[in-house]
């Protein structure tokens, strides 16, 4: 039984959306590697076996990594330090340890110290996800055409990083190497701050006593509906993201607030030209995303046409 | 030739996304009414004739409303007052004048004074749209299953409002009657404030010199991609929305900013419980929207599965 890129046994710690999608994509790619899984709860471990995307599960993370060539941390970011402390002594010499966390500097700081010299530590982040979570939410095509950023603690990560990148490409992703701090800033802009903003706006709607929840729900128009989907994402995952990517997220939110004040002032003073110019500029970014193939152009994501 | 609900001739002033979708939905419903159209530019009038969703176009709005039983203002909100001043004297006695503007109090104030006593004025707002605009963007099913709010200037609008509601139901919509000021507050929450926030966030990303536009575009993850779609909406329409629904939008943005500061403080002080509780609460709103049939539940709007 020969796995891809020498990974004959792969251990997944955490068996939710990302891990279960990875396992399915590995199978789809015809990788022969044995897939061993561990999740915190018995219920999730049983679900993973029942769905069948792992070959076996273990009761502890330490048991799962025994003899594994590739170990993937796929828990919420805040849990990774403790998992690393538990598995560190049991990792196979020469193995690669990676993770899929949405934040990279904090994971490097929390995980790195627990790893023996003989293990290659190559953090990574697949830029793919949905608002659903858990072992049943995964699917093999989740990473197709999306980026997986390889984020070595320093330098380019050598052969282990090159092998991990090749592995991700076989799962359908495009890969790129990025520095940890730059990763955290880019993601604060393209994901973390937008999520906090969406959570906030949905919270405001929920709180407003002069507009009932029923009205918010029934009359939710384009814009707000999208925010509610974003704000339905897993609370634990996102708490951990904000607590661990604190500085970059707060920096971007600070910029956001400044800019929002400027637009509010334009509304108050009736400065239609400023508003029109601003709204015209933001269209260019959208065009770029469509041209880069990072989203589809069906009106309203095809929702409107389907009703 | 007998139109629905006694509308034998319908005039559409403005021939963009909403008007062209209305015309297509009228045809789909088998309404026999003659559809006369006017738009500001020759190019749009020609496009409407070429696509074929109007029976004829006229060079002026005043000519279009001649003999029409139903006149629909479907221009940006800021243009409606001037159009009303032009067409007021030419409206047929007993005709119904309506509009589809996203804001209602300002339209009532701008349009009402120009209408003769003999005309029924019944403002309305279909809660359906996409980020695309222009005569080619419309489709017959745009309003299917979505709400159209009927917003009489005072009271219930009588028979003319009942007829207009029945007309919208034949276009596929569900209808409800709402008071103008309440409409403007509800929409500030469910649509207007979220749009300004999305425009702002995309503007911030565009401005940030340490993250290139290329990175923003390539690595735009869930969350931000949705914002870019919202922020690609028509600049003129949205400028007019904010200028005409100023007070309610600014009120909601004020609440939003307060709440955002509270969450920023929780991030700064590491208050994970507050964040987790907040993020759990907002999920309930999403569930309500799905149960009310106001959105679909395919992961990532079915984008992820399709790639
Ligand atoms: N969802 C996205 O959009 C997305 C995208 C890119 C990256 N990521 C990152 O991927 C990681 C996983 O996200 P996900 O969406 O797959 O989450 P998920 O569906 O909620 O799954 C998380 C998994 O981690 C397990 N877990 C939690 N704490 C644990 C612990 N202390 N020890 C062992 N297992 C534990 C959970 O087990 P139980 O079920 O037993 O609790 C569950 O199986 C996160 O770090 C996230 O930042 C997510
Ligand atoms: N899009 C949405 O999501 C949505 C949803 C609900 C309600 N609404 C409301 O519906 C209305 C129309 O929106 P839309 O999306 O259909 O806009 P659109 O696609 O941009 O079309 C606007 C139309 O109005 C015409 N127009 C502009 N100024 C005019 C003037 N002074 N005289 C005559 N025609 C003029 C334009 O003609 P030219 O092409 O010649 O410029 C164009 O045909 C707006 O009031 C908006 O608030 C929009």
Image (cartoon, coloured by chain):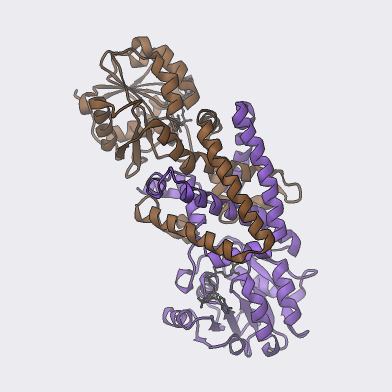
Chain colours: A brown, B purple
B110, A12: nearer the viewer: B110
- Is residue A122 rendered to the left or right of residue A252? left
Left or right of A12? Residue B105 is right
Decide which of A97, A256 is in the foreground and name it. Answer: A256
Q: Quadrant of the N terminus of chain A?
A: top left
Relative depth, front residue between B166 and B115: B115
Q: Position of residue A175 (x, y in %)?
A: 30, 38
In this view, A81 is above or below B247: above
* Residue B293 visible (yes or no): no
Q: In which quarter of the view is residue A83 placed?
A: top left
* Side of A277 where A154 appears, left or right: left
Q: Is residue A262 depicted above or below B44 in this figure?
A: above
Coordinates of residue A241 in the picture (x, y in percent): 51, 31
Q: Ligand 2: which quarter?
A: bottom right
* Residue A5: x %, y % from top left: 21, 27
What residue is rendered at 72% in x and 49% in y? A212
Q: Is residue A172 visible?
A: yes
Q: Is residue B58 above or below residue B192?
A: below
Q: Residue at x 39, y 18 (%)?
A: A112
Say above or below: B84 vs A172.
Answer: below
The residue at the point 64 percent across, 40 percent down is B260
Q: Position of residue B197 (x, y in %)?
A: 58, 51
């Amino acid at each position: 039984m020969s796995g891809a890129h020498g990974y004959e046994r792969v251990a997944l710690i955490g068996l939710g959306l990302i891990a279960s999608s990875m396992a399915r994509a590995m199978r789809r790619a015809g990788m022969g590697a044995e897939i061993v899984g561990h999740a915190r709860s018995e219920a999730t471990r049983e679900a993973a076996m029942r769905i069948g995307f792992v070959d076996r599960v273990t009761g502890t993370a330490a048991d799962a990594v025994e003899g594994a060539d590739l170990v993937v941390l796929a828990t919420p970011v805040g849990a990774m330090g403790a998992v690393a402390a538990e598995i560190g002594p049991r990792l196979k010499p020469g193995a690669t340890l990676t993770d899929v966390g949405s934040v990279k500097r904090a994971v490097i700081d929390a995980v790195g110290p627990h790893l023996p010299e003989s293990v290659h530590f190559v953090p990574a982040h697949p830029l793919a996800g949905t608002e659903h979570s858990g072992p049943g939410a995964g699917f093999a095509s989740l990473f197709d055409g999306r980026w997986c950023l390889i984020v070595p603690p320093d330098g380019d990560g050598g052969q282990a990083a090159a092998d991990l990148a090749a592995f991700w490409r076989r799962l359908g992703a495009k890969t790129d190497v990025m520095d940890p701090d730059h990763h955290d800033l880019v993601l604060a802009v393209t994901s973390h701050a937008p999520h906090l903003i969406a959570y906030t706006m949905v919270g405001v709607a929920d709180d407003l006593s002069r507009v009932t929840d029923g009205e918010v729900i029934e009359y939710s128009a384009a814009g707000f509906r999208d925010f509610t989907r974003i704000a339905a994402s897993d609370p634990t995952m996102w708490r951990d993201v904000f607590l661990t990517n604190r500085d970059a997220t707060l920096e971007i939110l600070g910029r956001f607030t400044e800019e929002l004040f400027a637009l509010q002032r334009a509304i108050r003073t009736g400065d239609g030209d400023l508003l029109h110019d601003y709204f015209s500029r933001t269209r260019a970014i959208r065009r770029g995303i469509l041209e880069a193939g990072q989203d589809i152009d069906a009106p309203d994501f095809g929702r409107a046409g389907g009703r």
